[in-house]
Amino acid sequence: MKLVAHLFIILFFSICSAQNIDANPSPKNKKEQTQVDFLKGKVDVALDAKTKTIQGTVRYTFIIQNITKSIFIDAQRMVIKNISVDNKSIDFKYDNKKIMILSDFKTGVEHTMTIQFKARPQKALYFIKDAQGNDQIWTQGQGKYTSNWLPSFDDMNEKVAFDLTINFTKGYEVVANGKLIKTESLNDSIRSWHYNMKKPMSSYLVAFAIGKYDKVVETSASGIPLEMYYYPSDKDKYETTYKHSKKIFDFLEKEIGFPYPWQNYKQVPVKDFLYAGMENTGTTIFSDAFVIDETTFVDQNYINVNAHELAHQWFGDLVTETEGTHHWLQEGFATYYALLAEKEIFGEDYFLYKLYESAEQLTSLSTTKNATALLDPKSSSLTFYQRGAWAVHALRGLLGDTSFKITIHNYLEKHKYQNVTTDDFIHIAEQVSGTDLTAFKQLWLENVRFPSEEALAILTKSTFIKNYLGLAKERTQPMAGKWETLSKALDFPVNDYIGQEVVYQLEGKTDSAIITLYDKAFKTNNIYVRQAIANTLSTVPKSLQTEYESLLKDPSYATIEPALYHLWVSFPKKRKEYLDLTKDIIGFNSKNIKTLWLVLALSTKEYQVENHQKFYLELSGYTSSKFSISTRENAFTYLESLQAFSDISLINLVEGATHHNWRFRNFCRRILDKLLKEEKYRKKYVVLLTSLSESQQEFLQKRITP
């Protein structure tokens, strides 16, 4: 939680002196097709996990609003078998991107169009294996990618009520937008799931997930079914993963002041997801990295992602931006309301500290060439998400709670199931409050530089923030001049963030005066203060050895990992004891502690020498695709540091370098390119070529050949 910049602190004290103050890559498309309004889409598809294909039909109902000779539908690299309009086959043109239908359509009456298609998508629809080796299939259409698996619309302004019928192997669960109307057996091996969607949505929000799942269903205070899915093998993690889910739903529905707009709400985890989560209409798909145990909850829980994606059901799904310029209306609002939900769970100090932390980051960003206004469609995620949230928070303070909540309600009511611009929102806010928001819009939305002074004035209404900044001011002072202040800040009950700030200011030094402060910090028994010690005190003095060793028993994997490493380095004679004590700890889903333990065990010559080969094989094995990408990253990182790649791990590295998850793919490519600079690895890969798939061979050949 240590801040990345000090600019905000410096600004704080200059303002105090002057004024005597007490101390998420956005879509860019506009509607292209205005002559036709698509109303309903009935999708009936079958999926084949072996061939990674999808085929079936989509039947659209539409009205021609203005006379036109042609209409088009987006479809990426598909086989279009047949198209009929009003039950008559027609001619069409297709260029692997768009289907163009040429015909004389009557205006003002409903027409139907049926498209029969087959596709082997390269994006937006992913066929993988879960950790148990079962088939898992899921979609990710953020922006304009659904047309890779379904003839649809790369235009978020085209809203359609989609009904999905999905046919797949028996024994699996199919989760999709809308209400499950029925399931039926088609034959001995195939089952059909029929989902109904009553209200329209942008086609990038059409989604489904297929896998081996169990579920728990709760009911919100307003009567909405809340379906929460989990892997059968993770039954003991269900409660921790979905902790506070009903509370978050009930809070947001009440806080937003507008009824949840969809038939139900479903959440389903998937392996190797591209992002933390995605707010598909009524159905959030999220990374199974957030399927966690009780200890992980302390440091890496699902609360923020849970609340963020749920808030999008109103801001993004119910009302959708017209284009990327207005992306903050989705991400800024979802970020702000997620923070409000976290405030209900973790308290006001957490809420304020998160705002302060983002203000630090935004202030720092303002000084770089990458700084942009909030209404710039090319803005960074930091700008859209965090600056967007700040704009909402500042507006609430300006309007007051009552006018703000009425504004939100009226905005959602007027524009429900439609597309919006920033001016649509600002106009309603001005109407409700009777306030001219020209200056607000210029300062918070159009100005490139983040309004740090105004943000600081908002934050320092809090005694906690003033106390925190007062302590942060001491960073530049010598220890002799601030020792008493730091000591007092560790008095019981210590604040999480103020206690951490004390530890950060100790800077890992170990003279006698500082040792006394470390001793007091240990005794606070505050999990976050102790975590800060583990992360910053890398050379452990003998006088703190016993206290430092106690960190290995803290209920925090983020504490145990650095504590184990620092103790192993600092006290070589006790390495066996430390390894024995932690040998059964796995850590996060990334296996952060287990992979570190294996490396330390391999690096301890006198420790279980007879098992070193076993330890190495386990570490190398974690590069396999059956493990999560975070686990694989840890394993690859350690193997690189040891310069100990086996043939299997080298093959797994190439698989990773062609993986569907772009972050992991780029990570693997960086390591692969380093290895290929060495002659021994180039020769190894020449030998291993035949062990790779055809596409992987082609990829590697291009990497090897200068």
Image: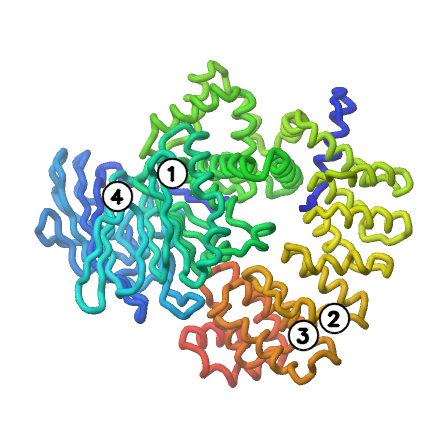
Which mark, residue 197?
A: 4
- Residue 175 horizontal side relative to residue 456, left or right: left
Residue closest to the far left: 88
Between the residue at mark 3 and the residue at mark 4, the CA separation in whole angstroms equals 53 Å
Between the residue at mark 3 and the residue at mark 2, the CA separation in whole angstroms equals 23 Å
Query: Of the residues tagged 3 and 2, which is closer to the observer?
Result: 2
Which mark, residue 176?
A: none
Q: How many marks?
A: 4
Query: Of the residues tagged 3 and 1, which is closer to the observer?
Result: 1
Amino acid carrying label 1: it is Ser
Between the residue at mark 3 and the residue at mark 1, the CA separation in whole angstroms equals 52 Å
The location of residue 706, given as percent across then percent down, is 55, 74
Which mark, residue 220?
A: 1
Lower sequence index among marks 3 and 4? 4
CB atoms at circles 3 and 1 under 8 Å apart?
no
| Label 3 secondary element | helix
